Image: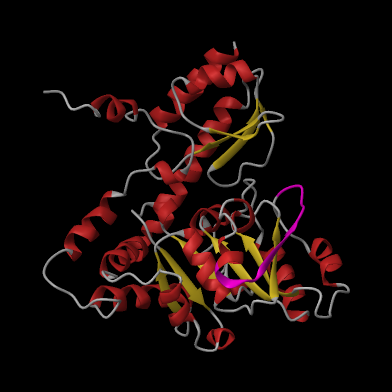
Amino acid sequence: MRPRNVSAVESMSRRSFASDNTAPIAPEILQAILDANAGDANAYGADPWTALAVACLREHFGEDADVYFAFNGTGANVAALSSLLQPWESVLAPATAHLQTDECGALERFSGSKVVPINTSDGKLRPSDIEPYLRGGHDVHFSQPRALSISQAPEFGGIYEIEELHELCRFAHDRGLIVHLDGARLANAAAALGTDLRAASRGAGVDVLSFGGTKNGLMLGEAICFFNPSLHHGAAPFVQKQSMQLASKMRFIAAQFVALLTDDRWLRYAGHANAMSQRLFERVRAIEGVRVTRPVRCNAIFATLDRDAIKAIQRDFFFYIFDEALPEVRWMTHWATTELDVDEFADCIQRATA
């Protein structure tokens, strides 16, 4: 008898350009999970894989990095910031930040702290954007700014240059602000900048990092890295538990990070995703009716095109409309996107806009 869900599986055989979350697990990562599945291991991180994963992260970010694992990006962001903020304090973030737009008020509900969204044209914050939010409102009627949260790479497809990060962190620290980096795509940003993970985060002055794995080949898993552990005053392990991010079978998250950070696989996966996005950009930039709207620095392309063309393309390839009003779409590549995937997608766009 034919299983009822076969057609659904067959419909997913063509590559999606919706998100790097749609990617399969990288084979080396899947093998690491299988290898970790041999025998028993102590729970809640008291296992050899977790110790090795922490050591690997410290090799990249510094021996004093305080590391905690989480299931997903929302959990990592919320647990990281909740370890640092009092309920009457707020975090300043771009209005487009995942923390503000895609996490359903998780930080506010869990910590009681407020996210203050700041409008920017490109999803990047600059000192001049932040300064007005630091004036006035210093009495009990107002939440008090305590942290700055930025994303690398930002949600609109650009990138913070290293000196921009240095400037932003200096500005924040001079005003007593903690800097949190949502690094869901830090690997892509570092690959695009031609630098390492530390230089693109801690080296620029970041205090706490949510280091993403899910978007770069892992099945699931993120790592919270505190570069100044004194800031959380010992709260982090308790917040990790209270925020439901303490995995009992931690070895299966940790083993993935060991594999990701071994032999620079993080760089290979992210570099390939970026390269496929550049290939797609080169193909679509010359198509009449397609206008690429934002810089293509990592693995995302934003573009506007005719609504009927969008519908025609979406019959064969899934992707998101990012801004319905324009309409502006987002096309994303990932570690498993192939040159053939890109060329077939570009050919489909060409036909739909002809």
**On screen, residue 253 above or below 25:** below
Instruction: Classify the position of the C terminus by image quarter.
Output: top right
- Farthest residue toward the right? 136
Of 217 and 40, nearer the camera is: 40
Colour mapping: secondary structure
What percent of the width, then of the height, locates residue 184? 51, 57
Q: Position of residue 197 (x, y in %)?
A: 50, 66
Foreground residue among 144 and 42: 144
Measured along the vertical axis of the image, is residue 77 above or below residue 46?
Answer: above
Q: Quadrant of residue 278?
A: top right
Q: Is residue 220 left or right of residue 5?
A: right
Does the magenta-highlighted stretch encompass residue 143? no
Is residue 64 or residue 132 the one in the foreground? 132
Give the residues in magenta. Answer: 110-122
Is 221 on the left-hand or right-hand side of 286? left
> Residue placed farthest to the top in the image?
354
Q: In screen coordinates, is 229 left or right of 96? A: left
Residue that appears at 67% across and 51% down: 96
Q: Is residue 198 visible?
A: no
Which of the two residues, 134 or 113, is positioned nearer the viewer here? 113
> Which quadrant holds the N terminus?
top left
